[in-house]
Image: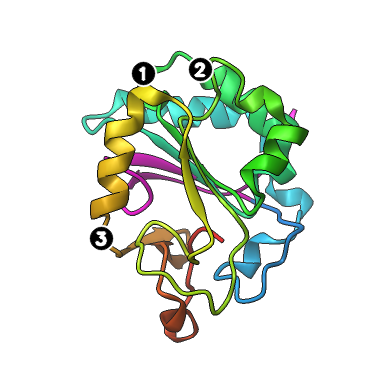
């Protein structure tokens, strides 16, 4: 099995509580107007990587001096690759460093519960979900989402205090990282700042 991959990076400080692995999947069929990352919409063949290789790369971050305490998955649209996403999370299940999995998705949670209930059955594959399409013009003061309509749902109750505190206190910021010859900004910019940012990048 292969997965379409845009970027894998550690450490990430701007998308979820703690120090996290950031995984951005390539490909999105939603194409929200005003999306900060339209470069992640297509599914080019060269972006497909073996899922097992991706699993090992994620787990390798736990072997260094700085260890992750969570995994954030965005895109693109993670649930446009539901089979690969599900298999990835099943392979990672039980690994302490990635037991806290936060997923950003443009689909509403009720739609996902109907289409992909296996992600949310007990025990759920995700700890928390930020759901809802990005809506240009529907601005928000919350630093953890791009538009006010989006919601945070905590599926693993043992992580409730962590996410509730993060949602209240998260500071909006962008993390500049280098990927090959390109500089990327990881995080969620204010809507009014997107057009002024060079190579903007964040969840949609």
Residue at the spot x=25%, y=43% of the render?
Answer: 165
The first of marks 3 and 2 along the sequence is 2
Q: Where does label 2 land, which residue?
A: 93
Q: Give x and y (percent) for residue 71.
A: 42, 36
The residues colored magenta run: 1-25
Q: Contact, CB < 8 Å: mark 1 with mark 2?
A: no
Which quarter of the figure is the N terminus placed in?
A: top right
Residue 4 occupies quadrant: top right
Q: Which structural element holds mark 3?
A: loop
The first of marks 1 and 3 along the sequence is 1
Which quarter of the figure is the C terminus placed in?
A: bottom right
Q: Give x and y (percent) for residue 82.
A: 72, 35
Residue 20 occupies quadrant: top left
Q: Give x and y (percent) for residue 34.
A: 60, 76
- State which mark lies toward you, 1 or 3: 3
Residue at the spot x=44%, y=86% of the render?
Answer: 196
As rendered, which of 199 and 130 lies closer to the eye?
Answer: 130
Binning the other alpha carbons within 10 Å of mark 2 as few (below 14), some (14 to 19) or many (20 upward) gives some
Binning the other alpha carbons within 10 Å of mark 3 as few (below 14), some (14 to 19) or many (20 upward) gives few
Q: Which structural element holds mark 1?
A: helix
Residue at the spot x=23%, y=33% of the render?
Answer: 66
Residue 96: mark in rendering: 1
- Between the residue at mark 3 and the residue at mark 2, the CA separation in whole angstroms equals 29 Å
Residue 63: mark in rendering: none
Q: Give x and y (percent) for residue 193.
A: 41, 81
- Between the residue at mark 1 and the residue at mark 3, the CA separation in whole angstroms equals 26 Å
Residue 171: mark in rendering: 3
């Amino acid at each position: 099995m292969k997965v379409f991959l845009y970027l894998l990076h550690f450490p990430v400080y701007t998308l979820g509580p703690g120090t996290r692995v950031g995984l951005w999947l390539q490909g999105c069929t939603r194409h929200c107007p005003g999306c900060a990352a339209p470069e992640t919409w297509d599914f080019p063949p060269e972006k497909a990587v073996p899922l097992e290789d991706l699993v090992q790369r994620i787990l390798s971050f736990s072997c260094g001096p700085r260890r992750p305490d969570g995994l954030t998955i965005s895109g693109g649209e993670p649930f446009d690759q539901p089979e690969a996403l599900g298999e990835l999370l099943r392979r990672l299940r039980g690994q302490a460093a990635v037991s806290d999995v936060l997923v950003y998705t443009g689909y509403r949670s009720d739609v996902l519960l109907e289409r992909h209930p296996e992600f949310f059955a007990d025990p759920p594959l995700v700890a928390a979900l930020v759901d809802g399409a990005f809506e240009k013009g529907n601005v928000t003061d919350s630093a953890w989402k791009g538009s006010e309509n989006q919601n945070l749902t905590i599926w693993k109750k043992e992580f409730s205090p962590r996410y509730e505190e993060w949602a209240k206190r998260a500071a909006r910021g962008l993390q500049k990282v280098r990927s090959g010859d390109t500089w990327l900004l990881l995080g969620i910019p204010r809507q009014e700042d997107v057009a002024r940012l060079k190579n903007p990048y964040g969840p949609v």
